[in-house]
Amino acid sequence: MMEKGERNTAPPSLVGKGGGELGQTPKRRKPKNVAPAGWTAEQGAAKLPAVFERLRETYGERRWRPHQEPIDELVLTILSQRNTDRSTEQSYLTLRERFPTWEQVMHAPVEEIADAIRWSGLYQMKAPRIQGVLQRIDDERGNFDLRFLTEMPLAEAKAWLKALPGVGPKTTAIVLLFSLGMPAFPVDTHVYRISQRLGLIGPKVSEAGAHDVLEAMLAPSQMFEFHVNMIAHGRHICHAIGPKCDRCPLLSLCPFGQSRLGTTTTPGKEESPPHA
């Protein structure tokens, strides 16, 4: 149990969570991601098994294993928003070095928290948000152990986390899936972009709404692997700018890529990206 005074400075786990990245405004315009004409939800669901298997062939089979405590995952995910993995890790480790317990983080002057996480984008907004989350959890639970969520139905566990200040569906799903092994599916910018281009989701489905749509298509045992492999694909091939459609192992399933290349045939040459 993670009590108030317990120290946990284990290195954060960042693989496959797809926190937002900061960078300069790209010179090239992003291609518009749209579902194919006449798209139906049934078509999207029917395509997903083939997408899942092709991603597995390309990036490998992924098995869920226990990560860190859910409270650590929660704070880490807040830090990862609009941030690179390296900056997120630096901010997290500095925060834990300066404030070894979450109770110390909760009670510290907000300016000191902001300074500790200054490598993180929007750190002046994240500092009071983190303290607000910790305060709410402490008020309701009296400690920072969130493993009680596994005893709740999934919908109730999601609702409890989303009631925390500034916690949305992606952060909620990451905590539940990565730390607790519960069947919640996180949708980050990579997953959302690729799902639109493949036609797994419709043109009017928002990024927030895509969590429930994609989660309903996947078996619980598929969620961790599909999430991590979709992010790997977004990083290696299906970029927001300049996607490598001619080298994509999903091209024969992707109306976006086929339209962009003016072809409906399977590519002759496929790239084999390194495992992420």
Image: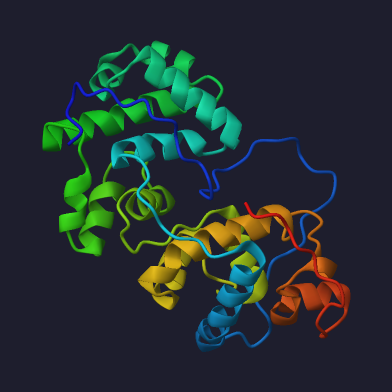
Residue 122 shows up from this direction? no
Q: Check the picture and name the quadrant holding the N terminus.
A: top left
Query: In this figure, which colouring scheme has been used for the structure?
Result: rainbow
Give the residue drawn at x 70%, y 54%: 274
Question: Residue at image x 79%, y 64%?
Answer: 271
Whole-percent x, y for residue 31 in the image:
77, 61
Q: How far across and how far down the image is residue 221, in percent?
A: 39, 69
Residue depicted at 36% across the width and 44% down the height: 167
Image vertical order of residue 20 relative to residue 180, above or below: above
Instruction: Residue 48: tell me if it is visible.
Output: yes
Depth check: give the residue in front, 39 or 195.
195
| Quadrant hosting residue 253 | bottom right
Return the residue nearer the eye: 26 or 5. 5
Residue 208 image point, x, y percent: 46, 59
* Nearer the observer, 240 or 220: 220
Horizontal side of 183 relative to 52 (left or right) equals left
- The x, y position of residue 145, in whole percent, is 20, 38
Residue found 15% across the figure and 32% down from its top:
143
Q: Is residue 266 above or below residue 101?
A: below
* Count of residue discs: 0
Image-based side of 59 in relation to 179, left or right: right
Residue 4 vertical placement versus 107 (above, below)? below
Q: Does 21 sit left or right of 15 as displayed?
A: right
